[in-house]
Image (cartoon, grey):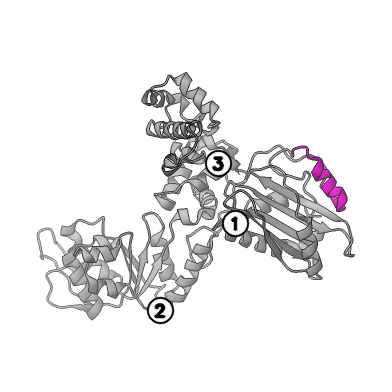
Amino acid sequence: MIHHHIWEEELRDLPRDGGPAAVWFVRREGPDAGSTLRLLCGWTAAGGPAPLPLGLIHQVLRAGAPAQQCEESRSRRPPLVQALPLDDGRGAVGVLVAASTGHAPWADAVRLWAENTARRLGPLLAQLEPWPGTWLGREPRPDTRQQSLFADHELLPPTGRPPAKTGLLLPRAVPVPGLPGAVGRSRELCRLAGRIAAVAASPVNVLLHGETGTGKEIVARALHQGSPRRERSFVGLNCAALPENLFESELFGHKAGAFTGAARDKPGLLESAHGGTFFMDEIGDMPLPLQIKLLRVMQERQVRRVGELESRPVDIRFVAATHKNLTQEIEAGRFRLDLYYRLKVVCLEIPPLRQRPEDVLPLLACFLARAGHDVRTLRVADAAAAALHAWRWPGNVRELENEAARFAALHAETATMELRHLSWEIQESAGPRVDPDDLGTLRRLEDANELLERYLIRKAIAASEGRKAAAARKLGLSRQGLYKKIARYGMTDLIGVADAAS
């Protein structure tokens, strides 16, 4: 038999957004359709125990095919319940049920996880031991309806008490196939990797567009590695980091004596990239006179060093990247239209981290491991995971890397990442949000007063960087008065944040 800890290893990679979610693994204990069902593993989050959708389970076992349903609820994001057959090669012998919010990207991410897990565990199902306890990470609430549910449908729950542990293990740092150096499991990255594979073998120029910190150089290197030019040089240039007076010399090279300080001949970056790939990051910051000369190189495939009369032939593939809107730059006269169309033979859009939050925890695991933190046993509390997913990540992957470095430096011996271990800005994003537009909605004065006070309290604490005393002064309250209001409105995520600095 395979040890029951396999369930926690499988669940660690489950995408979770901090909202209601549940996963069940059910096995049929005999060959007949009426055989008893055994619950091998059950896990729920943000809502405690949930009733098993036994009707859906029986439907999948009878048909041997996946089934799903959407349940109506008061939430604007109804849970999507999907059930997949666990096939051992002779037919469906069990069912994997996954319930999550129907909000993209979580529905897609959970669906991918469920499909991969069902494919992997189906042949092993007969050998798996039940998890000792129905729900992981929390003590199940007494629920007589659950007990009758088991009895009425001849469902055998696992025996024993669930382990007294908080949160699930940190997900594995999953590399993206076809995108070396990238970590994640989102559909957006998988689609991008597919486009890179299709474009890499072609000699066409590529324009990458994405926000700062999204990993444009990783994509550029993947294009180079997937091309016939992989054995030659990959040369990169950050157009925003080079002073304008050195730009031409660095790009084209110079002849000895061409200007003061030019003691010897020097090949330029373009010449060094002969036969390979030349990557220009932040192309939107290239000076306009240099854009004209670069366009000439792209047209004639020749480079002339500063101070020389003869040109040298070059064979280069150009990959450029920018976070700017080049169409607006063209309209403002800061970027040449003809150069834009020379570069934009193929345009690849790199999605920001906020559009693929299911990649946050795998990336965090990768960066913590790089920082020297042991991630094999590190757990992430539900509140911390929800806060990390709720944060907008304006600095994208680079900002997340800094957050990982901060945690590794300050909490090296911590076994569970809690909400209080995160940066103040991320902690603040975890609480219930108050949209300023809601303040103008007609409602009872009592409700409007509470909404306004909650909004102003969060605003004041954010403006004070978590210092309660400073926030209280901004609101015209005593520190004790501020704490009373925080407790009255149940804003518990604000308690204990930056108190030492108050």
State the extent of the magenta-drawn residues as a range: 141-161
Q: Are marks 2 and 3 in contact (CB under 8 Å)?
A: no
Residue 50's x, y, as percent?
72, 47
Mark nearest the camera among 3 and 1 is: 1
N-terminal of the pair, mark 1 or mark 2, is: 1
Q: Which residue is mark 3?
A: 384
Residue 155's x, y, as percent?
84, 52
The residue under the point 27% across, 71% down is 340
Check the image and report above or below for 316 versus 477.
below
Give the CA distance from mark 2 to mark 3. 44 Å
The amino acid type found where label 2 is placed reads: Ser
Give the CA distance from mark 3 to mark 1. 21 Å
Check the image and report above or below for 407 versus 109.
above
Disc on res. 102: 1
Q: Are marks 1 and 2 in contact (CB under 8 Å)?
A: no
Q: On the image, which quarter does residue 287 sit in?
A: bottom left
In reply to whether residue 485 is colored magenta, the answer given is no
Q: Crowding near pointer 1: few (<14 within 10 Å), some, many (20+)?
A: some
N-terminal of the pair, mark 2 or mark 3, is: 2
Check the image and report above or below for 58 versus 19.
below
Q: On the image, which quarter does residue 120 sit in?
A: bottom right
The amino acid type found where label 1 is placed reads: Gly
Q: Which residue is mark 2?
A: 202
Which of these two is toward me, 170 or 316? 170
In reply to whether residue 159 is colored magenta, the answer given is yes
Which of these two is toward me, 255 or 395? 395
Q: Is residue 265 visible?
A: no
